[in-house]
Amino acid sequence: MTHSVSRRAFLELSALIGTVGRAGAPFALQLAAMNSAAAQSVSSYKALVAIFLFGGNDAHNTVLATDTDTWARYFAARNIGSDPIALMPVGTPPTAIGAVSPVTGRTATLARPEAWGGVLPIKPKTAQPIPAGTNATTRTFALHPMLGPVQTLFNAGRLAIVANVGTLVQPTTKAQYAAKSVPLPANLFSHNDQQSTWQAGAGEGTRVGWGGRMADVILSTNGQNSIFTGVSVAGNAVFLAGQSAIQYQVSTGTKPANVVTGATSSSLFGSSIAPARLQSIVQDTSAASDFANDVSSVVIRSMNSATVLNNAFGLAAATGIAAPPSFTNPVTGLTETNTLAAELQTVAKMIAVSSSLGLRRQVFFVSLGGFDTHDIENTIQPNLLAKVGQAMSYFDGALSNIGGVDMRPSVTTFTMSDFSRTFTTNGDGTDHAWGSHHFVMGGAVNGGDIYGVYPTLGVDAGTFNNPNMSGNALIPTISVDQYGATLGTWFGVDATTLGTIFPNLGNYSQKTLSFV
């Protein structure tokens, strides 16, 4: 099949490799003035780090309400099927492998909740309201047993939870959703569309994301190295695509690869003069074709930016950013690579050299996939959440001492995901739903609390009518627009521009929250 690709689109895609205005010498000048650059005070630098959990993380087994009334509905809904996914109550000791659990009567295995012990209690600073129509007298909360590092961050006041966030066009009630009397996001429950709506405010095919729009606003503050304003360590992401800003993609290797292999090497094909000759050919913009010249210019800038970043990463090594610790899959007992932690290590290196590159604002994108747990959720989600916990804790520690400076107050990290999962189980997993709970971490975060109202849980039955759920899905009470606008406000984006970045923001009386 032949596709028609515009010249502009081709160049934009090509430039994803990386661009800067000039090569080599500017960076050398920056190194000479490194002390001056570093002196621009930590407070003048800010970074947003988006962690996307691809596939739709099951929020009901991530952040749980543990008051007796709610827990009874939760446990009844999930402790059924061929492989029940209900977690064990707070304080339940782990059942030894091969022994029978006194809670469920099942034999414990590594891949069953009985073996993991009870959910981990957390105590928010602010009391949550009692859900209407329930018998609860207070609200208590907990995290998945594999989120011990997140519990530590929450208790230390460096991590907050934002409850029941999702894609919305305007505030939507259960009755309005049922009657379809208000506009709704396109293709709810579709992975591709909801991933795009979370990142860019509209369904699949949207070309500009809200991270990229924020990068547009602050490009000029980053001077000649503005190409590093929006950086993805997880491939091409619409989240970072802007009108002017073009995301710079890096890998999790020790160094970013040069765009033209061999052009900056000391030898090529056994010849010491071949690299220079190859570089001159690539940099030749004397072709008769404007298109060829434009492509050549893009490649030149890409080579130059790779050189700048490779040199900068050499400096990052001196800051002592250690590699993430080894990771053991808690379900299989086998050692695995925590790719999320590796991506966050690369982000930490980029932050470490931000001053030497003259950068004042950056937006990053990292991700972890596999959260589409229609089946074998007990095998998949615990391992993924353990990786999230380890990665976030590692990143918090890495930022705490970059060259002797605590960068945590300057960096805010937050999670996103397609949607949550159904409240009830399908037998051994969950299906697509809507509203979800998310983590926000950083030194500037008002941590140790839950923001927004944690919803009433439970499917309608008898006299119980849940105002927050339609069928098995939570109807969000906080929009992605409010979530993103809160982060943008901290980042320094003014209210008028936020209204442009998030066109639906005007539909909400409360534009931002107070978690940061």
Image (cartoon, rainbow, N blue to C red):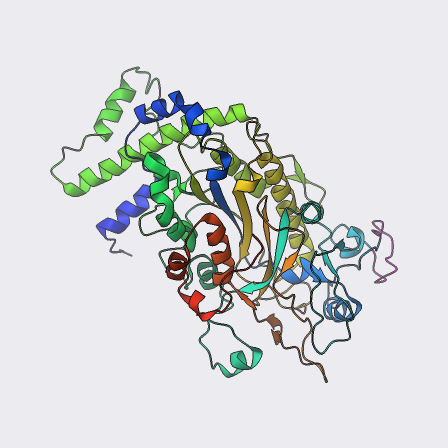
Q: Evaluate whether residue 44 shows in this view.
A: yes
**Residue 132, quarter of the rendered image:** bottom right
Expressed as whole percent of the image width and height from the top left, the position of residue 109 reads: 78, 52
Residue at point 58%, 34% (across, down): 406
Q: Is residue 69 left or right of residue 484?
A: right
Q: How many marks?
A: 0
Residue at point 57%, 66% (across, down): 435
Expressed as whole percent of the image width and height from the top left, the position of residue 287 reads: 14, 35
Work out whether 372 lies above or below 259. below
Q: Is residue 304 left or right of residue 376?
A: left
**Residue 229, quarter of the rendered image:** top left
| Image: magenta residue range | 93-107
Q: Which quadrant is the N terminus positioned in?
A: bottom left
| Nearer to us in this view, 132 or 106 | 132
Q: Is residue 290 left or right of residue 392?
A: left
Expressed as whole percent of the image width and height from the top left, the position of residue 256 reads: 43, 32
| Nearer to us in this view, 138 or 250 | 138
Q: Evaluate whether residue 258 shows in this view.
A: no
**Residue 477, quarter of the rendered image:** bottom right
Residue 237 magenta: no
Residue 94 magenta: yes
Work out whether 353 lies above or below 413. above
Residue extending furthest toward the left: 288
Q: Main secondary structure of the magenta part?
A: loop
Expressed as whole percent of the image width and height from the top left, the position of residue 417 reads: 54, 57
